[in-house]
Structures are given as structure tokens and as C-alpha cells.
Image (tube, rainbow, N blue to C red):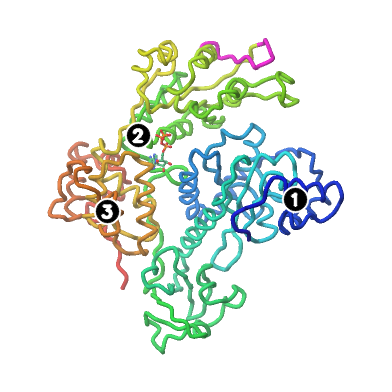
Amino acid sequence: MRGPTIKTHTDIESARRQFFEHGRMPSPSVSNVIAQSWLRCADRLDPDARPPIEITEWKTLEHRRDLHAELRRAALPELDALAELLRGSESLVLLADTEGLILDTVGNTDFLDKTARIALQPGAIWSEAQRGTNAIGTTLAEERAVEVLGREHFLECNEILNCHAAPILNTRGEICAVMDVSSNSRLNNLHALGMVRMAIRIVEHRLTYTVPADCRVLRLHQQAQLLGSYREGVLILRDEHIVGANRTAVQLLHTHWQELLDTPLEQWLETGGDPRASIARTLDGRQLHTARQCTPSPKPRPRAPAINDGFIDDPSTSVQLEQAVAVLNAGIAVLVCGETGTGKEVFARRLHARSHRRSGPFVAINCAALPETLIESELFGYTDGAFTGARRKGALGRIREADGGVLFLDEIGDMPLALQARLLRVLQDRTVIPLGCGTPVTVDFDLICATNRRLEPLSAAGRFRKDLYYRIQGYNVRLSALRERHDRIAFILSLFEHLDTSNRQLSPQTLQYLAAHPWPGNLRQLTNALRTLIALTPPGSTIEVETLPDDLLGDSSDCMAFPPLLGGDLRALNRAAIERALEMANGSVSKAARQLGVHRSTLYRRLRDPAGNKPHCQ
Ligand SMILES: Nc1ncnc2c1ncn2[C@@H]1O[C@H](COP(=O)(O)OP(=O)(O)OP(=O)(O)O)[C@@H](O)[C@H]1O
């Protein structure tokens, strides 16, 4: 594994010359890992070739995703969190299986040209055999974390990427997936690999949450306060034999997986005859703090209704969604407005998934992030040799990529005026004229736009064309800011239940603070805050108000007026929320459940047990 990169382009260039022109091993200009990978690839690939990008069929991809359901549940929140950290830095976060098949990507692909965008999409295979030296494939070949920067990629066509990947290990120490951050090679993201490694530790820790019913969990660390955090070591025991572990436990015991697995615990730790002792000694005399989980790791609760592994099917927007589906299916454009982080893109994706265009593509374009010089070619495409540097076979352009599906124009309020005129023509005629070609090409798509700006004043000030404004807002959806939502307690509880897989609870006071916070970053900020609280709290315990970071505890003047919890009691609060919802729904449990954002069965359960208490550890 390598630390932060200090290689220069000149180093890589000289290594390439030594290897490809003179047939010499290039060390030390590139690492041995890269040199060995080049050697493996030289036998079967041509570095100048552009091998076709094969995308696995949708059905096969879905099948693979099902096979990795548990892994994806553990990893997707971290992919989201990494993408959030890298937001705006022309980076993409990927999860691939052990054959290098990309299962999921999160982030913005706008910085990539079309070919690379396709190559980095779910379903594409990035094994070394298919795509030469690359971070995913080479990580799998070397079974270690790998960075592949620009022209270190064996195939020249991949030189536009800097990639940083590391393997995710299951509790038997076997590689079960690879996490990767791929960025524009013009960026030198020295910390990307470190970020990937940290995310992987969290994922691997989460993989220890679901253990077989006949197993017990032993947590260990030198520092007692880290027990229960993702930084602890975890041993999975059956009949006092170690049948699984996380990477940290292996490191804490100064050993290797092969030596550790299926051996008796007492071969590694002395507990002075008391298996419940909170301090144990390693055989070389080091002291470790330990905690036993007295019952098997809790099974994940039934999840709140969600689509696409991560999003609450939010009842307060479900009516808007139903209407928007009907409107979009009638060929009318939908405009989604709302502050940053209110879920506009999520809404648009759900709209596409529900519409009659669901089997067609969903093409998202961030109008604020389009590079000025490339806007036209990027959107409208170009023909063979339309301009210097144009690809030999031309390019479709993003609008034509949306043919048969949905075109999503995000941040439409930031689209330059000149482009607005051209877009208007496309929308009126449903044709595109690629650069270098006088002939219009018909294109068939439905349109969803989103903005966090108010378009009316922009249009009054002459910064947004009125005719375009009227064309894009056939139906207007306004997503409320979190602070405006009356159902925010129910929403916070649903989101929390969805994110937490290990029976943690929010104390009434914590919930009160969360509900009273103004959340300027809306659902995005709330999701990240809940994830942090979950990471900081041991499975099965209650998140107390002391765990809240200062900015959430904040100055009370930052907080919204929020009625105090009735008697500070979560039971009473839940009861009040349920009663209010039932009242508004004229006693219909289904409607009330939808209003509260919980499943009907959850509402029945809560009616019996309003605090939603879970079984306790005996
Ligand atoms: N219905 C939902 N359930 C759970 N989480 C959600 C939901 N909608 C949005 N989120 C969370 O909020 C994040 C931001 O959502 P999204 O990107 O759609 O917001 P946006 O309004 O488009 O933001 P921006 O205007 O900044 O681009 C998501 O990544 C997700 O974590």
C-alpha cells in the first residue's frame, strides 16, 4: 500500500517509455504494483486499443445486486457519505464485486466524456483482464489497496482518470467487494485513498452486525471509549472459538486471518477465568478493553418503505409524486423546486422510476456545472470532425442519450441565456441539430427540471427567458424545507430507523433537539447528522443528547420554536403524533400511516407500544 502520492507526470511518462518502448521494468518511477500489473496486461492487451465497453444486462446486474444485498446495505451509506465529501470535486464513488463488475456508483459524471461515463456505470466490468491496469481490477489482482493515476492505467484511453481503490473484507478475511474513488486526472486528490480506507473500516464494522444466531460477539480495543465505535475490533465466537473477525481485531491481536480463524479464544486472550471480564490480556501481555454482546447481534428491523436502497418513500410528498407521474405520463414537463438538499433529484429519479418511461434512460444534467466551452457539444452532440479534437465517430450529446427516457435538467435557473434559446427550440421541436450537421434529429423524451432558485424574479430581471419558464413548468412541485414540515418528527424517526440496522434508539431529548434544529441543509444534512450519531453510538444503545455535536445543540436562538415533548416522554410524543395523524385521516390507519411515513403494520405496532420499544438484551 502506498501513502499520499508524490509521483509526477514526468516520472510516470519516463516509466511508460522504459516499459513500452524499451521493454524494461520501470521501477522506481512507478511502484512495483503498477509495474507488475503492466507485465500481466502486456501479454493480452494493446495499450493503444480502445476495447469495447460491455455493459452487463440489467437483469444480470439486478441479480448480482441481490446476491450482494447485505454488502450493499452496509456499503451504500458510505458511498453516499464519500460522494458528499467529494461533492464538487469531479469525483465518483464506486462499489464493485469480486469480478470487477460495478454494482453502484454515486456522484457526478459530468466531468467525464461520454465513453468514460458509460465505462464507469453500473454493469461495466473493470477486471484487469478486460480494462488493463486500473484501481478496481488491480486491487482484486493484488488483494491490496491500489492507486492508479492517469497514465499509470495500462490503456491510454483511461488516462483521464485518477483512481483509488481498496478491498472490503468479510468477517472471514476474504475480499467481498472493492470500493473506489475515481476522479478527473487533473486533480491530485492526495487523501482519496485514505478516505476510501476509512469508509471501508466503517463498512466492515457494519458487516459484523449480522452474525448467526448461535454466535456471540466480543468487542475489543486498547481504549475503552472506542468500544462500540467503528474503530473497535470485533471477534465473532461460536462455542468460544473465533469464527469471524474484523480487520481491526486481527491487527489488535498482531496476527493474520489464517492463524486466527477457527481457533479457541483462549489461545489469544486471557480473561482470568471470567469470560465476562471487561479487561483481557493478549498473550504478549498487552491490555485490551473488552465487551461481550450478551445476545446475538440484533437482526435488522423491518425497514421503512424505501426504494433504491436508501430513500424513505416519503408520504408527505407521495401525493405530489402521484400527480407528477400522471402529468409526466401525459408528456407535460415537471418543475421541482425547493431549497438545497430537500430531495429534488431523489424526487426526479423516483418520478422516472414510476413513469411509463421507467425502462428508458434517466439522463441528469447539472446546468450549473456545464463547462462553458463544451456546453453545445456536450448537450447537442457533434458529427465526425465537427471541430478540432472531436472524436472520430462524433458524439450523440446528452439530450439524445435521453431518447426514450427522461431528461433531468438540474439547477435550470443557472443555465446561460444563450443556451436557454437553443434549449427552447429543442423543447418546442423535439429535435436536436448536432454541431457540424445541418440536419435536425428527432428526439423523444419527457422533461423534469429542478431548481433551488426562484425563477419568476430571475425571469422578471431578464436572466431567465419567460417563454422557457412557461414551457418547463407544466406542473410545479415544491418540496418543503425540513423546518417547515409538520411531520418532521415522524420523518426523523423513519429516516433514523432506516439508517440504523442495530437497534439503537433516540432519546426523547435527542429527538427534541433534532426536531427543533433549523436544518439549512435539509434532508442531506439530516441524513449525514444521523449517520454520524449512529457511528458514534454502540449497537443496541440509546443516543443521548450528549452525543449531539455542538452545532446541533447550538445556541437556542438558532433553533425553531418547537413544542416541548409531552412530559419529555417519547411514548407520549409518539402517541400524540399518531393521534393527530389519525384525526387528520378520519380514522383511516392506512392514510395515517402514509402521513407519518411508516408502514401500516408499524402504526398498528406503535398503537400497541407507542415508544416502539425493542426487545432488550437479557
Ligand atoms: N425521500 C428521502 N428519504 C431519505 N433521504 C432523502 C430523501 N430525499 C433526499 N434524501 C437525502 O438527501 C440527499 C440530498 O437529496 P437530493 O440530492 O435529491 O437533494 P437536492 O434537493 O437535489 O439538492 P441540491 O439542490 O443541493 O442538488 C440525498 O442524498 C439523500 O441522502
Disc 2 marks a residue whose amino acid type is Ser
Q: Position of residue 302 (x, y in %)?
A: 38, 54
Image position of 29 (left or right of 322): right
Distance CA(mark 2)–CA(mark 3) = 23 Å
Q: In the rendered structure, find residue 318 and report the number of the disc placed on it.
A: 2
The picture places residue 604, in percent across and down from the top left corner, at 26, 50
**In the rendered structure, are the residues bearing label 2 and label 1 in contact, judged by CB atoms less than 8 Å apart?**
no
Numbered label attached to residue 605: 3
Give the mark nearer the N terminus: 2 vs 1.
1
How far is disc 2 from disc 1 in space, using C-alphas?
46 Å
Q: Secondary structure at mark 2?
A: helix
Task: Give the amino acid type for the residue marked by disc 1 in the picture.
Answer: Ala
- The answer to whether 119 appears left or right of 474 in the picture is right
Q: Residue furthest left?
A: 567
Q: Which residue is mark 1?
A: 129
Q: Please state the extent of the stretch shown in magenta in the rendering.
A: 428-439
Q: N-terminal of the two: label 3 or label 1?
A: 1
